Amino acid sequence: MSNSPNRLTSKRNLYEWLSLIATLALVGFIFLYVHSTETDRTFSVEQDRLHVLTDFVAKDIQVSLTTVSHVLEGVIRDYLSDPSTPASLHYLTLRLQALEAAIPGVGALLVLDAQGQVTHTSRENLANLNLSYRDYFKQARNFPDKSMLYISAPFQSLKKQPDLVITASRMVQDGGGEFSGMVVAALDQDYFAEPFTTGIYAPDVSGFVVHGARRKL
């Protein structure tokens, strides 16, 4: 008979422990559910925000490249469209220098002949260089299309420091419609960094541009 109260006490203790464990498990489950739901909600909100910012930056860069394309077309129209009238070296150089100064992120503007020789440039140190080995020149020479804006893959510039450059260029055609050179805008990294300034909304947010050749700028 003396064992009966002890047995009831043990059962009651076991029941209380089981109840406590069940309660803690339920609380833990609720906490995990709420945490998981909040994490999914935050992830979805951030993902939507990043999609909007990505579209915004992409459109901004597209508009900037369209502007550069119009600039190059203007140089061709005003100075290089009539092969029978040689362009004035003095005035064309001034035009290139003014355009470089007016467009942030443009490191240099160049005019190349059909052999890849720099005939006009906004930078004196680039004058008379032969750039026929550059891929952007080969692309335009081998696949000429006067309506196309050629965008190069990032490559090392001619400067000593290890910086990357992307060129935007348009071909120049002669009187017969054949390739006779190109006008090139060398775009440095700041040109592509500027559109990200409004999109970096937190210290741990970063952005980058990836070329179709899978090179990051």
Image (spheres, rainbow, N blue to C red):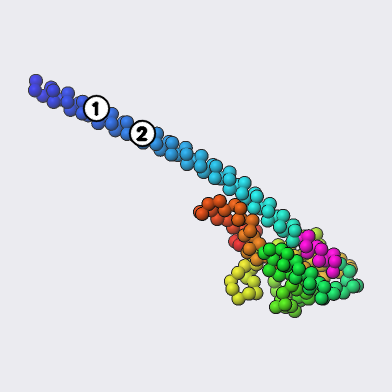
Looking at the rendering, in which quadrant would you find the C terminus? bottom right
Residue extent of the magenta highlight: 69-79
List x then y, in percent, for residue 169.
75, 65
Q: Farthest residue toward the left?
A: 2
List x then y, in percent, for residue 88.
85, 74
Label placed on residue 101: none
Residue occupying the point 81% across, 63% down: 74
Where on the picture, by quarter, is residue 103?
A: bottom right
Residue 135 makes an appearance in the image:
no
List x then y, in percent, for residue 136.
71, 67
The crowding category of the residue bearing disc 1, from other C-alpha atoms within 10 Å (few below 14, some 14 to 19, many at least 20), is few
Position above or below: 37 against 5:
below
Task: Classify residue 157 as left or right of residue 79.
Answer: left
Identity, as a three-letter code, of the amino acid under mark 1: Tyr
Label placed on residue 15: 1
- Residue at image mark 2: 27
Residue occupying the point 81% across, 66% down: 75
Residue closer to the observer: 87 or 132? 87
Where on the picture, by quarter, is residue 16?
A: top left
